[in-house]
Amino acid sequence: MLDRTVKIAPSILSADFADFGREIQAIEAQGADWVHVDVMDGHFVPNLTFGPPAVKAFRPHVKTVMDVHLMISPVDAYIDAYAEAGADILTAHLEAGPHSHRTLQAIRGAGMKAGLALNPGTPAEAVEHLLDLTDLICVMTVNPGFGGQKFIDMTDKIRKLSAMIGDRPVHIEIDGGVDPSTAPLVVEAGADVLVAGSAVFRGGSVDKAEVYGENIAAIRSAATGASAAA
Ligand code: DX5
Ligand code: ZN
């Protein structure tokens, strides 16, 4: 059975870009379940981050799960490079090209879990014939490209996906604008992986890492309906 307990995946897009190793160690020590890595190409999205050599350098610091979100087009030519870099999960956008079916097969063929991300304008039904090739659907609740944007309510899409997925071992991940006020809405609709950038890193630093811990705990408590830790 797939683990559907809520998992918090801080996005290192909001970390100190000069100190990724220590930032990753800090968020994991403070309760991160996965580490979310946002790869942007300045073409599929209007922002540019890092590529395979940087992701490879992150790998030894990640003890949990390295969840790599590709906001690049095309994808297929780079799949082997991200496998070699050590990605556990490699997520491509459905909108990145006409052959998502082939892309998902290639990701699994390279030994990684295969994720498929959907922009806000893409309907749930678009993944219907891809679900058996997919380990994770990432529902974007902002237009991809930047951290710190306002949450777009996609709860109806999450509910439809959850029903379509049924018993299949497919995670539903939410990415964009997740904080303690929005987390309960998406978890109630069926999400189990919550990416959060600004809501995790806000107010903290590697030398004030306990703030990361408080921020992660606040999202988790809100999402699971538990009372906030004293
Ligand atoms: C957006 C990225 C997100 C981003 C989330 O394009 O895919 O992972 O870092 O940032 P917040 O949580 O600040 O919206
Ligand atoms: Zn992301």
Image (spheres, grey):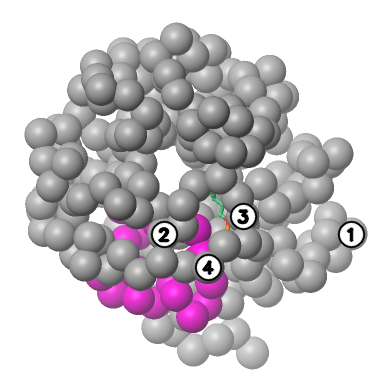
Distance (Cα) linking label 1 and label 2: 31 Å
Mark positioned earlier in the residue sequence (1 or 2): 2
If you read the primary sequence from the N terminus, does the residue marked by circle 2 or circle 4 appear first? 2
For residue 90, which numbered disc appears in the image?
Answer: none
Check mark 2 vs ligand 1: CB closer than 8 Å? yes or no: yes
Element at badge 3?
A: loop
Q: Which residue is painted at 80% across and 65% down in the image?
A: 204
Q: Disc 1 beta carbon < 8 A from ligand 1?
A: no
Quote the CA–CA distance across marks 3 and 1.
22 Å
Residue ID at (49%, 47%)? 144
Q: Which image quadrant: the C terminus?
A: bottom right
Q: Position of residue 84 (x, y in %)?
A: 54, 13
Q: Classify mark 3 as within 8 Å of ligand 1 or not, answering yes or no.
A: yes
Residue 141: which numbered mark, if any?
Answer: 2
Instruction: From the viewer's perspective, tell me whether residue 132 is left or right of residue 45.
Output: left
Disc ID at residue 147:
3
C-alpha separation, residue under disc 4 versus residue under disc 1: 28 Å
Tell which of 86 and 128 is nearer to you. 128
Bounds of the magenta segment: 172-193
Specify the label residue 150 is tagged with.
4
| Position above or below: 150 against 74 | below
Which residue lies under the disc numbered 1? 207
Q: Say left or right for 29 vs 127.
A: right
Q: How far across and how far down the image is residue 182, in percent? A: 45, 75
